[in-house]
Amino acid sequence: MYQLLGIAVVFGALVAWLLTADLSETELITLAPAALIGYTIDHLVLTAVSALIVLAIAIPLGILLTRAPLRRFTGPVLAVANIGQAAPAIGLVVLLAFAVGFGFSAAVIALVLYAILPVLRNTMVGISQVDGRLVEAGRGMGMSAVAVLFKVELPLAVPVMLAGIRTALVLLVGTAALATFINGGGLGILITTGVNLNLVNVLVAGSILVALLALLVDWIGRVVEQVARPKGL
């Protein structure tokens, strides 16, 4: 709750500063409420689309890699997934833009590659840490492998999986600011505009808004973790 209060205080201070600061005509246009809302919506859409794709890929893949027939592929798959984390984010974004074209699609692909590892790894770790005796007990009761997965393994793995999802979301919100370099939209345009035109007020406002959005997403993730955590864990 203190984190949310801190976010609200900083946001209120930012609004008060923008209302009282001596802004140039260009800064007034760039930091107009309608413009800021538009940039924020674009940023959230970019983050949400990327997050949905990450979840759709990483969770099923993580489950499959914990199954005995596919465990031998764990090393190679994690090595490929780690490319997004190992490569500099801005380099990954720009290279993909040249490969698939500048715009929203390239930004989404880059963000997915960058954020897929935490979800994939935590899904695998969460399921792998489930006590084998509970799995055997479920099978001894006549449950199928699928039933054991959905009724025993996944519910017990939820806390670890949610931690990975929260990490990925925070990474996505922060890295989405780089989408502006390839015409992907988002709040990053405030940062690049501030740098290119030497508009310090715009640069500071954009940086603070991205940071606050990342902190807000992190707080929401913590709340979801607490709510979704199975009782007794």
Image (tube, grey):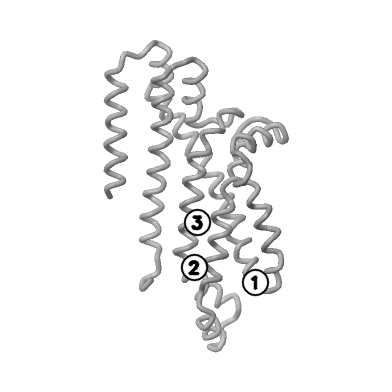
> Does residue 102 lie above or below 214 as drawn?
above
**Residue that appears at 47% across and 63% down:** 160
Q: What type is the residue that disc 3 sits on?
A: Gly
Q: Is mark 3 on a helix, strand or loop?
A: helix
Residue denoted by label 3: 164
Residue 40 place in picture, x, y as percent: 44, 33
Mark 2 residue type = Ala
Please report the residue visible at 27 percent of the width from the left and 47 percent of the height from the top: 2
Q: In which quarter of the image is residue 87?
A: top right
**Image check: 229 left or right of 120?**
left
Circle nearer the N terminus (1, 3): 1
Alpha-carbon span between mark 1 and mark 3: 20 Å
Q: Residue 157 carries which label?
A: 2
Tag shown at residue 137:
none
The residue positioned 54% from the left and 56% from the top of the image is 119
On the image, the x and y values in percent for residue 135 come to 54, 80
Q: Earlier in the sequence, mark 2 or mark 1?
A: 1
As shown in the figure, which amino acid type bears the numbered disc 1? Answer: Arg
Percent x, y of residue 199? 44, 17
Which residue lies at the image location 55% right of the left edge and 88% below the top edge? Answer: 140
Which element type, helix, strand or loop, lies under badge 1?
A: loop
Circle 2 — which element?
A: helix
- Residue annotated with mark 1: 67
